[in-house]
Image (spheres, rainbow, N blue to C red):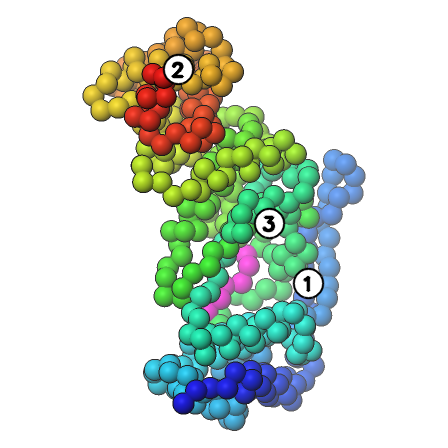
Amino acid sequence: MTVNREELKDAAVALLREIAAAAATDLGDNLYRTQTSSWMIKTSETSQTSQEFQRKVFDWMKVYILYQKVKDEMPHTTVLSKMLVTAGHRGHPVELTFDFVYPLVKAWSKLEKPLEFKGPEFEQLVLSFRSKVIDHDMMTKSNKKYALFGVDLQGKDVTLDHEVSIRRISDAELWELGDVTARPSFSPTGESAWSSPHLLGQGLSSDWVILDIVVEHDEKENPSDRLRLAEKAAYVDMALSREGGFSTVSLDSIIYGETLGRFGRRGYMIDEATSENLHRFWAGLRAPTTDNHLRLALSRLLEGLKKYEREDAIIDFTIAMETLLVIGREAKKKTLSERGASIICWSGGAGRKQTEEELKLVYKTRSDIVHGESAMESAQVARTYECAEAALKSIVRWYLDNGVSSPTDLRNRINKR
């Protein structure tokens, strides 16, 4: 037996209408709640003040909890359970309801206007449910968002690919993040409410810039690795595209943050030129590679930008350059300084001889730090840090711009010039 596609769609819509009717009867005026949210509003070019806003919103959580209580009394819960079995899904009816019907109800109740039962979002929701049941399309999407503090997005939002974008905060996110009437972190829905953005020491405002990552994956697949790789690629891309520093905080929990470019110029502006650079490097950063050299070097670059001590960052930057420039048992100091100077000169940097000497000093400083030599003057460490960071970024950019696959590939190219 097969399930008729239109009958399944009609049954899903009928169940949602049953839930809406039950909610209207059971909750009455409590079907909607008053949402109070606050965020910072500009009062002048240099000052802001916190302001509260209110609106009526559909209380999706109460409706979802109500369905959990009365689902067995609703005829179309049983109808859908039978259709799931007919469509070839195995399991106890309770399990099938949990796996298929609960997500449908939750997604519907969280629509902006769920009681209208129409519109593109509603239609897409029902069609996705139908495809999941009949076609066994178990693909889903996972989303991670990060606030980027210190980032000034001057032009258009930056869409790097279909999964990753750097954009302004949306109105819906302002309301949700600023919600001072949010429920406790634990709830029967298994979701955590947003924490107060003021706990971050950063006033929520329409100036916030968001790193938004969405990956599509099979429901059985854990997307955490893909999400983290996309996040790291975005940070490296920003580090390569212009100078500046910024801090990040995950908006899922607001329990951790990272600072990149700790010792550089604070603040990071995304203008048209920066946007072009972000797109310029992105394909190379996201392209799958069979060689680990670039991947390891990018990880070291990112770690170095996060370090609290310049000495630790110098070690990371130098190891990254070794990874990209040195092959096997080649003399590290000599090879690093010579090949690094070649790339930097080809990229329009300082003279070859001067660059070689600077890179030799970087390597010597790294060795002194590792072997516990006498403490160096802070000014020397600061200069070495700046030199190492700039050199590594130049080398990585050259790798990406020229499609270099490994240090061996690099050596062959140098020998041909």
- Look at the picture and state if 141 lies above or below 336: below
User: Does residue 33 appear in this view?
Assistant: no
Which label's residue is closer to the chain start, 2 or 3? Answer: 3
* The residue stretch that appears in magenta: 190-195
- Disc 1 is placed on an element classified as strand
**Which x, y percent locates residue 240?**
50, 30
Q: Residue furthest top?
A: 353
Identify which amino acid the numbered label 2 is placed on.
Arg
Label 1 Cα neighbours within 10 Å, binned few <14 / some 14-19 / many ≥20: some
Identify which amino acid the numbered label 3 is placed on.
His
Identify which amino acid the numbered label 1 is placed on.
Thr
- Using residue 228 as the reference point, say whether residue 118 is left or right of it: right
Q: Is residue 193 covered in magenta?
A: yes
Query: Can you say which quadrant of the picture contains the C terminus?
Result: top left
Eye-nearest disc, 2 or 1: 2
Alpha carbon distance from label 2 to label 1? 65 Å
Q: Give the residue drawn at x 37%, y 59%.
A: 222
CB atoms of marks 1 and 3 within 8 Å: no
Closer to us: 222 or 119: 119
Q: Which residue is mark 3?
A: 198
Query: Can you say which quadrant of the picture contains the N terminus?
Result: bottom left
Q: Which residue is mark 1?
A: 36
Closer to us: 205 or 232: 232
- Disc 3 is placed on an element classified as helix
Which label's residue is closer to the chain start, 2 or 1? Answer: 1
To which quarter of the image does residue 217 belong? bottom left
- Look at the picture and state if 329 lies above or below 403: above
**Which x, y percent locates residue 176?**
62, 60
Which label's residue is closer to the chain start, 1 or 3? Answer: 1
Q: Give the residue drawn at x 24%, y 15%.
A: 331
